[in-house]
Amino acid sequence: MKYKNISAEDLLFYLYFGIMVLAKGFGLVSGEPLYKACMIIAILLIIARLAVGYYSRYEYAFVILTLILAFLIWRIAGNQAVIVGALLVVSLKNVSVKRVFQLGAILWSIAFTIQIILQLLNVVPRDFVIHDKLHLGYVIRWALGYSHPNVLQISYVVLISYVFYAVRMNVKKLTEAVLLSFAGACYIFLYSISITGMIYYLIFVGLLVTFEFLRVKGVPRGILERTVLQMVFPAAVGISVLGPLMLYGKAFDLVNRITTTRLYLSRYFLTNYGITAFGKDFSGLTAGLNLDCSYTNLLVYGGAVVFAFTCILYIGMINDTVREQRSWENSVKMAIIFSSVVAGISEPFLFNGSYKNLTLIFLGVWVYNKMSAYSKQTGCKCRSLMPVSKTVKVVVPDLEKLKMCRGISRSAWKIILTVCIICAVVGGSMYGRFAQMPQEVYALRISCDTDENSVNVFMSPEQIQQIRNGGDAWVLNYKDQNTPMLRFDGNIIKLEYLRGIVSSALWCAIVGGLITAAVEEKKKRDVHK
């Protein structure tokens, strides 16, 4: 930690960014009163930042047109997501990307960890869906505080993306970080069973390792590599928008099965509702009709104008990014961009206001760099509506210089590792020995993606209370005696038992390791007194 004087313009941005990161990191969704309050504060902070900042007339034109377009789509189609993305993009003038990612890494880590702990301790209600997954039969997919299990896995990828960009690593540190992040991804996957989210993680890490390998080996980025990378975004858009309309027969069925009906849903929306200039209001649709493809989502919900505008900006940013010199930041940046572009084919997080599309940070900075260069070239001066010259001293985390457990000796590390192993074995064994598992699980049918042959169960509140008091069954949710429920047993219980053992072992190891590390650190300080 260190103190640094920052301008009022920067302070306003970091306050805005911090509020939005925490709001989404804690799983708040549109419509909740607390999220509405966060959005109002965020809008006011951005307005203040735009007022005190210095902008050229070209930059003012970009800001005004972008915000008018976003609010127009909101009024016509009720699409608040475009506003969320537009506010982030227009707020990024003179912003340090490294500092943004460092702040994001700290805040998202805090929010994500607290979410997981509160959910595992059953302090807050759990969100879930029950699916037939991985040939295990019906299993519970936990969201652990987020709106959907896929969102949980994607939130983890966002976390490690923040961390990898914020902290520069050599080959050894990168190897250790990748292995640690993989273990974390597997743990989250144990609860989410999100195949698309896990693929997103693997693509990100695979690209990062590849780009870093080429950088370390001194391989220049040739025309073939640049061309292939430049084609990724157009290909993703083409598959998403044209694929549903051009594929038929067995080819359509194959791709639709791979994308778990996302291709069918894209075709349904494109053919039944068509495309408009500024989107349509779909608030009256049934809950089962979700347009998960980011690109089709933007085109249908946001309209052709914002879709074309976004595609043009992305193509320009990517073309310039692949021409940059190889560096650690460029490797992570390109891994984030291209993994997100590919993941957007099957997940809606790029343009749905979830604040998980980190590529928008690079996009906003790129736009302002381009306009700043053009303004200097044309001699256009920057002016402020409300100039503020005062600076504010704040505590700024410097993750580049943060060395956790710095100075701990090799012998101390052995002690810490031993304690972690012992705690893991004890914690996992205690759960495995004493945990009381149910014989069956009940859940509302609306929370279960099952076939139509499943037998509905109807129970009164008295019956539900009796089941809960008996302890032989879990009732995950309940509405009333007229709402159908389903009953499950078998592997759904076995998987919960496995999850309990793994979580008990993991968190006991973490707590034991942290306590031991603190003790060893205290011993070292006492010796130096």
Image (tube, rainbow, N blue to C red):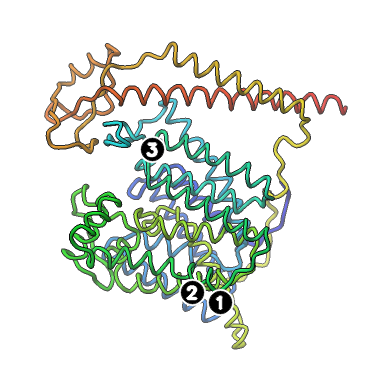
Q: Position of residue 307 (x, y in %)?
A: 35, 70
Secondary element under disc 2, as helix, strand or loop, is: helix
Quadrant of the rendered image containing residue 315: bottom left
Comparing marks 2 and 1, which lies closer to the viewer?
2
Residue lying at the far right of the rendered structure: 529
Name the residue beneath numbered marker 1. 370
**Gap between marks 2 and 1 measured at Cα:** 10 Å
Name the residue beneath numbered marker 2. 316
Closer to the chain start, of discs 3 and 1, is 3
Task: Answer left or right for 200 relative to 404.
Answer: left
**Gap between marks 2 and 3 measured at Cα:** 35 Å
Residue 305 vertical position relative to residue 48 in the rendered view, above or below:
below
Q: Give the residue displayed 47% in from the left and 70% down from the top.
A: 230
Secondary element under disc 1, as helix, strand or loop, is: helix
Marks 2,1: beta carbons within 8 A: yes
Name the mark on residue 192: 3
Secondary element under disc 3, as helix, strand or loop, is: helix
Name the mark on residue 523: none
Closer to the chain start, of discs 2 and 1, is 2
Q: Give the residue displayed 61% in from the left and 51% down from the top.
A: 102
Q: Position of residue 318 (x, y in %)?
A: 50, 69
